[in-house]
Image (cartoon, rainbow, N blue to C red):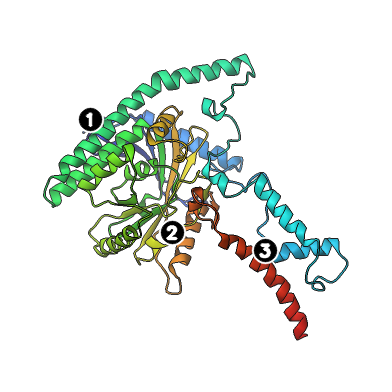
Amino acid sequence: MQGSSGDCAVTATCNWQQPTGGCGKSCCTISPLSTIPPSGTHSSPGALLCKMWATLRIERGAKEKNHPLYKPYVNGIIAKEPTSLEEEIKEIRRSGSGKALDAPEFELSDIFYFCRKGIETIMDDEVTKRFSAEELESWNLLSRTNYNFHYISLRLTVLWGLGVLIRYCFLLPLRIALAFTGISLLVTGTTVVGYLPNGRCKEFLSKHVHLMCYRICVRALTAIITYHDRENRPRNGGICVANHTSPIDVIILASDGYYAMVGQVHGGLMGVIQRAMVKACPHVWFERSEVKDRHLVAKRLTEHVQDKSKLPILIFPEGTCINNTSVMMFKKGSFEIGATVYPVAIKYDPQFGDAFWNSSKYGMVTYLLRMMTSWAIVCSVWYLPPMTRQCDEDAVQFANRVKSAIARQGGLVDLLWDGGLKREKVKDTFKEEQQKLYSKMIVGNHEDRSRS
C-alpha cells in the first residue's frame, strides 16, 4: 500500500493476515529509502513479494526460536524480586535468629536489609541509569559506543573502518542535505501558511506541509518504522500519549498523522522550529517552571478537547527523555481533563543506532549529527486501543493504568519514579517514607502485643 502527500510520500508495505493462533492485527512498515513511483504506476510485484517474504521469514524465525523481536528490558545486573520491606526483614530475621519474629522491637540483623539495599543502589541504580544511553549486549560497530579503541583482530578493524567510511563519507552528506531541506521547508512553509486567514484552506495546507516535511526528516534519519494496529490511531478531540525517548518521537508519530502538540519551550534550533510551527497550527508551548503557564496549558487543553473537530493533542507525560528501557511516572495534568486517551508505545532497536537524547550532555545539533552517523533508526510503534477514565478512578490512577499498558506493549520496565529526578535531587519525603514504613512495622508489632 502506498500513502502519498505531495512529493514526500512514504512507501508503506502493509501486511494483512488472518488470525493463525496470533492476534491477526494489521502491521505497516515504512521504508525511508524507497522511491515513490509517479501517479498511476505501481511497484514491481516481485519486489513486493520479496519484502513480504523477508518480513515473514524474520517473524517465523523468531517464533521458532521463541525469541521476541523486541526483548523486554531486564531489571539490571542484580536480580531483584518485588517484595516489601516488611517481608524482606522478616526473612532476614527468620534465617538469622531462632526467636519469634515478633518478639523484639528491633534486631541488629535489620541493619543488613538497609546495607544491602544501599549497596544494590550504588551498583545497579534502577533510576539514574535510565538517563544515560542503554548498554548493548554486543558492539554495533559504532565508534561512540567504545571511546577507547581496542585492537581485537585485523578483520574486525577493517570492518569497523569500512563502516566509518560508509557512514561519514556517504550516508552523512546525503542525510544532512535531506535534513536541511526538511527543516527549511518546515520553517518556511509554516511561516507562510501562518499568514493565511483561518479556514479549510489554511488547515489543508498546514496538514500537508507538516506531513511532507516530517517524512523528509524521517528519510534524513534513515528511519525504518513499523506501525502496528493503525486502526487505533488517535482521532480528533482526543489526547495521544506516548513514552518519550527523543525529540524524533514527534517525527516518528507525525509522519503517520497530524497532531496539535504540547511541550516545553526550547532554545536554539528547536526553539526556531517551535516558533515557526505554532504559526500554522494550534500547538501549545509552555515554560515548566512557570505556575501561570501550567494553569494556562490546562485551560487550553480542556477547551481544545471539548471541540471534537480539532486535532488530537500529542503529549509526552513523562516530561523528559528516558533511554527507552523503561517508562517513568506520567504527570497527571493531561489525565484530569476527562478526554479519551489514545496510548502509543514506541520502542527503538539500539543495535542500529541509539535514539536516546541526553539533553544534559548534548545539544540538539550535536544530537542530530550523532543520529545521522548511525546505521539507521529502527523502531516499532504500537497504537493501543483508546482508554477513558473510570468512575472510581482519580487522575493518578488513570495515568498509571495508561503507563502500564504502554510499558507492557513496548516491553519496557514500568517505574513509579519521577523523570524529574534527571535534573533534581531526591526529595527528603522519599527518605522519610522508608523510615515511616520501618517505624510502622516495629510500632505495629508493639501495639499488637499490647492488645494481646
Instruction: Identify whether 60 is placed above or below 328.
Output: above
x, y percentage for residue 31?
38, 34
**Looking at numbered disc 1 in the image, what kind of residue is underneath it?**
Pro
- Can residue 233 be seen by looking at this rendering? no
- Of the numbered discs 3 and 2, the one sitting upstream in the chain is 3
User: Which of the 4 image quadrants contains residue 177?
Assistant: top left
- Can residue 226 be seen by looking at this rendering? yes
Name the residue at 39% across, 42% down.
247
User: Which of the 4 image quadrants contains residue 66?
Assistant: top right
> The C terminus appears in which quarter of the rendering?
bottom right
x, y percentage for residue 122?
66, 46
Instruction: Identify whether 58 is placed above or below 227.
Output: above
x, y percentage for residue 308?
25, 62
**Looking at numbered disc 2 in the image, what kind of residue is underneath it?**
Lys
Give the SS element for disc 2: loop
Q: Are marks 3 and 2 in contact (CB under 8 Å)?
A: no
What residue did someone put label 3 on?
84
What residue did someone put label 1 on?
38
**Nearest to the observer: residue 81 or residue 49:** 81
- Of the numbered discs 1 and 2, the one sitting upstream in the chain is 1
**Nearest to the observer: residue 411 or residue 248:** 248
What residue did someone put label 2 on?
331
**Looking at numbered disc 3 in the image, what kind of residue is underneath it?**
Ser
Q: Are marks 1 and 2 in contact (CB under 8 Å)?
A: no
Graded by Cα atoms within 10 Å as few (under 14), some (14 to 19) or many (20 or more), the crowding at tag 2 reads some
Give the SS element for disc 1: loop
**Nearest to the observer: residue 393 or residue 106:** 106
Graded by Cα atoms within 10 Å as few (under 14), some (14 to 19) or many (20 or more), the crowding at tag 1 reads few
| Marks 1/2: CA–CA distance | 46 Å
Identity of the residue furthest to the right in this view: 98
- Of the numbered discs 3 and 1, the one sitting upstream in the chain is 1
